[in-house]
Amino acid sequence: MNTPVQPIEVLLVEDDPGDELMTREAFEDNKIRNTLHVVRDGQAALDSTGGASTPRPPAPTWCCWT
């Protein structure tokens, strides 16, 4: 029996619009139904999650710094 998987909220911190587009296309091409939120820098990421003093969820499952 397969249990439906609930979509998750994904926060993409990306300053390059081209890389954002590739990520969105990869989600679409692979039928990934997660909600993608995009911010342009680390400060915006902290602000979008409630700031540095807000308790954080578990560590990200994937990060890439280039």
Image: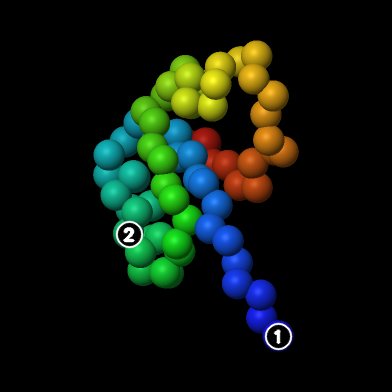
Question: Residue at point 45% right, 62% down?
Answer: 33
Circles 1 and 2, Cβ within 8 Å, touching? The answer is no
- Say which mark, if any, is on residue 25: 2
Q: Amino acid at mark 2?
A: Glu
Q: Is residue 63 left or right of residue 1?
A: left
The answer to whether 31 appears left or right of 22 in the picture is: right
x and y percentages locating residue 43 in the rendered image: 47, 18
Foreground residue among 31 and 5? 5
Q: Position of residue 17 (x, y in %)?
A: 27, 39
| Label 2 CA crowd tier, 10 Å (few <14, some 14–19, many 20+) | few
Asked if 8 appears above or below 39 in the picture, the reply is: below
Q: How is the image coloured?
A: rainbow
Q: How many marks?
A: 2
Residue at 67% across, 29% down: 56
Secondary element under disc 2, as helix, strand or loop, is: helix
Q: Quadrant of the N terminus?
A: bottom right
Q: CA distance from mark 1 to mark 2?
A: 30 Å
Measured along the vertical axis of the image, is residue 57 above or below residue 6?
Answer: above
Residue on which disc 1 sits = 1
Up/down of 61 relative to 7, above or below: above
Q: Could you tell me which residue is drawn at 72 percent across and 38 percent down?
A: 58
**Residue 17 visible within the image:** yes
Q: Secondary structure at mark 1?
A: loop
Q: Looking at the image, is mark 1 or mark 2 earlier in the sequence?
A: 1
Residue lying at 55% horizontally and 52% vertically, measured from the top left: 8
Crowd around label 1: few <14 · some 14–19 · many ≥20 (10 Å): few
Residue 66 is left or right of residue 26, and the answer is: right
Q: Position of residue 45 (x, y in %)?
A: 48, 26
**Residue found at the very far bottom of the displayed protein:** 1
